[in-house]
């Protein structure tokens, strides 16, 4: 019988876990890989709303009167006058572009009479007498 060779290992130091602080500081960062840091906008807490301010504004009599005021309009087209409760209702009834009625209403309230043109047709709007 021949003697068997045994493998021997070199004596090594026992494994030592790294300290937590060493692990955090030695952790690779994005700059180690050629990445630039993110530039994010500053975080702002969203506004919760102004419902209390709007509710308080209704206590002012001038504001209340302005908000509750309704102006009817009379529309003349092809020598036919049709009364409507509002500019928006008139635009819907005449199938005019609703995207333009708010700006037109502001101009109509300022002057009292305005003409609206759509596809070559003329519509004469006039604020109704109160």
Image: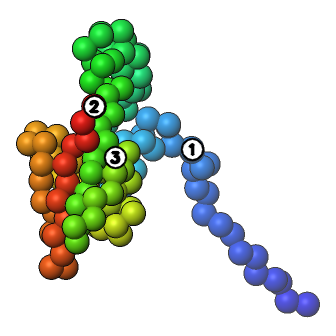
**Which circle's residue, 1 or 3, is located before the other in the chain?**
1
Which residue is at a point 13% across and 42% down the rendered structure image? 112
Residue that label 1 marks:
17
| Whether residue 41 can be seen here | no
CA separation, marks 1 and 3?
79 Å
Identified at 8% across, 42% down, the residue is 111
Which residue of the protein is positioned furthest toward the right in this rendering?
1
Quadrant assignment, res 110: top left
Q: 120 or 57: nearer the eye? A: 120
Callout 3 secondary element: loop
Mark 3 or 2 closer to N-term?
3
Crowd tier of the residue under label 2, counting other residues whose Cα lies within 10 Å: few below 14, some 14–19, many 20 or above: few
Structural crowding at the residue carrying mark 3, measured as other residues with C-alpha within 10 Å and reported as few (<14), some (14–19) or many (≥20): some
Closest to the observer, 93 or 81: 81
Give coordinates of residue 100: x percent, y percent. Answer: 23, 60
Q: Give residue 75's position: percent from left, percent from top.
A: 25, 57
- Local packing at callout 1 (Cα closer than 10 Å; few below 14, some 14-19, many 20+) is few
Query: Do the numbered discs 2 and 1 sit on residues whose CB atoms are within 8 Å?
Result: no
Q: Residue 130 shows which numbered tag?
A: 2
Q: Are marks 3 and 2 in contact (CB under 8 Å)?
A: no
Residue that numbered label 3 is attached to = 86
């Amino acid at each position: 019988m021949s003697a068997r060779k045994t493998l021997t290992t070199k004596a090594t130091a026992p494994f030592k876990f790294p300290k937590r602080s060493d692990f955090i500081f030695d952790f690779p960062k994005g700059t180690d890989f050629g990445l630039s840091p993110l530039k994010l906008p500053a975080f702002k807490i969203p506004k919760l709303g102004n419902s209390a301010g709007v509710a308080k504004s209704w206590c002012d009599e001038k504001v209340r009167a302005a908000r509750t005021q309704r102006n009817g309009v009379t529309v003349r087209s092809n020598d036919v006058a049709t009364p409507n409760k509002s500019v928006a209702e008139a635009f819907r009834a005449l199938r005019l572009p609703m995207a333009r009625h708010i700006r037109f209403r502001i101009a109509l309230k300022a002057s009292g009479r305005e003409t609206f043109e759509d596809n070559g047709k003329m519509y004469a709007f006039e604020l109704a007498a109160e």
